[in-house]
Amino acid sequence: MRLLNITAFFFAVSSALLLYALNYDTRRLEAEVQARERLSDQARSDIAVLKAERGVLARPDRIDGLARQLGLASPKPEQFQNGREVSELNGRQDGVNGR
């Protein structure tokens, strides 16, 4: 009977230590997951901001004004092998400008 009590005591102590270590590891892993989720949320937020900035910077009216300040102009027929590409560009530009 005495051997059974000693065995049960050591089993209980070893189980308690094992459960404590498991609990500690679980909390550590949970903290790591939360840190990565925060990083992921921050990255998503940064991506959304960058997409919005790209949308603002890529507006045709903004680019057109900056290009004219730099002395750039619409392509001329001499710049292409044949004039067909220029007429297509002019047709697209007229459609955008509402002409």
Image (tube, rainbow, N blue to C red):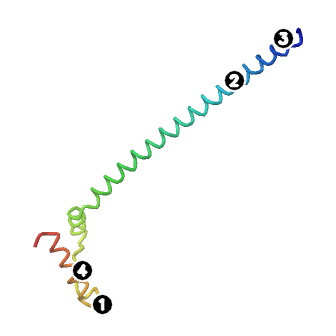
In the rendered image, the vertical position of residue 79 relative to residue 94, given as above or below? below
Q: Residue at x 44, y 42 (%)?
A: 41
Q: Residue furthest top?
A: 2
Mark closer to the observer (4, 3): 3
- Alpha carbon of mark 4 to alpha carbon of mark 2: how far? 74 Å
- In the rendered structure, the answer to whether residue 13 lies left or right of residue 91 reads right
Mark closer to the observer (2, 3): 3
- Looking at marks 4 and 1 on the same chain, the residue that comes earlier in the sequence is marked by 4
* Label 4 crowd bin: few (<14), some (14–19), many (20+), radius 10 Å: few
- Looking at marks 2 and 3 on the same chain, the residue that comes earlier in the sequence is marked by 3
Q: Quadrant of the N terminus?
A: top right
Identify the mark at residue 81; answer none if there is no mark: 1
Q: Which residue is mark 2?
A: 19
Q: What residue type is disc 1 on?
A: Gln
Q: What residue type is disc 3 on?
A: Asn
- Alpha carbon of mark 1 to alpha carbon of mark 3: how far? 98 Å
Identify the mark at residue 75; answer none if there is no mark: 4
In the rendered image, the vertical position of residue 43 relative to residue 54, given as above or below? above
- Looking at marks 2 and 1 on the same chain, the residue that comes earlier in the sequence is marked by 2
Q: Residue at x 20, y 84 (%)?
A: 87
Q: What residue type is disc 4 on?
A: Pro
